[in-house]
Image (cartoon, helix red, strand yellow):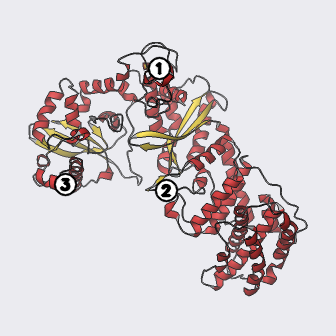
Amino acid sequence: MQEGILQIGRAVYDSDNFLNNIIKDVQIKDRKGKPRYVIQIDFSIEKDKIDIKLFGEVTKDSSHDLLWIGTADGSSSPQWYTTGNKTEYLLSQTIPNLINLNIPNISNKLRYILNNFFWDFGKQKGTKERYRYVVDLKKISNELKAKDEIAKDADNDIKKIVKVIDKEVANYIKSNLGITNKEVALYFITIDNRKISDMEEYRQKIKEEKLKVYEKSETGSCSLCGGQEGLTSDTSKLKLKFYTTTNLNFPSQFLKSNYNKNMVICKDCMIQLMAGEQYIIDNLSTYLGNMQVYLIPHFLYTPEIDKGDMDYISKDLTNTFNTAKKVQGIIKFESEILNTFEDYCEENYYLLNILFYKIVQKAVKVQKLIKDVQPSRFRILIEEASKVQESFKSLISDKFNTHFGLESIYYSIPIKVKQGEVKEYRKLLNIYNAIFKRLRINKKLIIKSQIDLFKVHYFEKHNQYNVRPAAIHFAIMQSNMLIKFLENIGCLEEGSAMELNSLNIDDGIKEYIKEMKYSEKETVLFLLGLLVGKVGNRQYSDRNGKKPILNKLNFNGMDLAKVKRLSSEIVNKLRQNKILSYNEKIYSAHKQLFDKHIKNWDLDKYDNLYYILSGYSYATMKSISKERGNKNE
């Protein structure tokens, strides 16, 4: 993966200005297309006042103009950058930390500001010392709270004091400028209207901080380019942690000092890796469901491309990845790159690394890296997804226009979600890995996951899982689509369809069984479920939307004894609901096959329930698609 990042970094690297390579993009408009704003926090020595004012709307140049590079590296690092997307640091620790850095022509002037524009809450213990100084709200407006009031509101807890002041300033901005926190993209500090971020000494300090790992060069050869000058094994400045330097299980002889025997990186490669990472973060990121994804191309040959080429590759991804955030973006991504490189090479000039990640304490934690995915695989996925959609439209109804794609799979494999964060993601990511790499998946695992999905729908536990609310019959039909899709792309072994000529049932039912390649035992269950669906349809019409027949199903699984019982009871239910005469052929076919296989039954309770519910879904979907009023069908 790091080679792909390095290739991108080399393409986009600005050799004339190092800082340009680590500047972050900022969204110009919000999701609703409304403008976002930049707020200036000016420490006016002349006026003896902190002047908070609207600097203007965000533009494409705002990040460069204000040197927006995010926060200082590491979750517990002192924060000293003067441009931020929140005010908390800027109102507290930024200026004290800048003073401690002893930056020529800056630190002395900031000492005056610290002494005259900040409240001192006294010596603090440990890391809380960084919150000791907080802006004097009275320097912003006499109408804001005094120091004692703030301390009382925060129970004299210094960290709470910072948050209370942050909230006070947010309210001040809202009432005086008419702008809420959500509308602000960036805040920045000035002294008498001069940006600290424009000062050469400040910019030089950032460069030194980013490259301080090279103050003491190590020996060896660069693991990426083979160079022998300016080497380090410290990768802490990189955002995408593909290599650890903290776990003592990894270095030679379990000594941290021996990490340089595992991997060292030269200064040029490190800078280009930083540039590549930032470009990926800004241009090649998306979501799959609620899971964050980086898409990292790895070119098989040294690419003759520059930043203009990389921009061309990613220009059409902005709306797809950052606005729509749909799986079609990945398909579009593959298509765009293939089109872009028609002038350069043949297909598969590159492979794609798909990195699933989450942000933990400002660091990127890799959840799964799917390596070396061929671009042609995406063409297969979209073609087969389209075929499945058309097939089910033909089998169910012309009105059945359900879209199916990679994101559909995310919502079809239930995983626990807590406070909006996916908690049990490994099973789902293993399925995606199999899909992208054409690996076999155990069908038993898929069936079990689908039973779990149906339980979420039936018992309405959507808020606990990554599952969107839907009618259960619809979810089951989508599950059938998933099974068919996985078979079509080579991830599930296809079944052997039974011989259907001997069954005296409607051709439409036969077509569905044939398309799904059901065995005789699976057909036994499908037909039983079909009868359950027929009863349910009549009950729905006669009982104000209720389907008591579903109480006959155990959503924890249906063992053979329960299947036998349901098979016996369904006749009475058909008779009670006055539809037996219309469904005798289906029951006869079910009974004929069941009697044939009952003594050598080898399907488990999850298989039994799955295929029964598949039949139920088919009957329900067909009923919905037909004209209302035909109760006998």
Judging depth in this view, the residue of 77 and 31 nearest the camera is: 77
Judging depth in this view, the residue of 139 and 356 nearest the camera is: 356
| Residue under the image location 22 percent in, 47 percent down | 162
Residue 257 position within the rendered picture, expressed as x and y whole percent measured from the top left: 43, 21
Which mark sits nearer the N-terminus, 2 or 1? 1
Given the current orientation, which residue lies at the most extreme front position? 253
- Is 288 on the left-hand or right-hand side of 383? left
What kind of residue is marked 1? Asn
- Is 384 on the left-hand or right-hand side of 233? right
Quarter residue 130 falls in: top left
**Is residue 1 positioned above or below 160 on the image?**
above
According to the image, label 2 marks what residue? Answer: 417
For mark 2, give the secondary structure. Answer: strand
Q: Which mark is residue 407?
A: none
Judging depth in this view, the residue of 78 and 627 nearest the camera is: 78
| Nearer mark to the viewer, of 2 and 1 | 1
For mark 1, give the secondary structure. Answer: helix
Which mark sits nearer the N-terminus, 3 or 2? 3
Residue 587 position within the rendered picture, expressed as x and y whole percent measured from the top left: 82, 76
Q: Marks 3 and 2, Cα distance to the nearest angstrom?
A: 34 Å
| Residue under the image location 75 percent in, 79 percent down | 570
Given the current orientation, which residue lies at the most extreme right position? 502
What kind of residue is marked 2? Val
Neighbour tally class for label 1: few under 14, some 14-19, many 20 plus, Cα within 10 Å: many
Quarter of the figure that contains the N terminus: top right
Quarter residue 484 falls in: bottom right
What kind of residue is marked 3? Asp
Which mark sits nearer the N-terminus, 1 or 3? 3
According to the image, label 1 marks what residue? Answer: 260
Q: Which mark is residue 155?
A: 3
For mark 3, give the secondary structure. Answer: loop
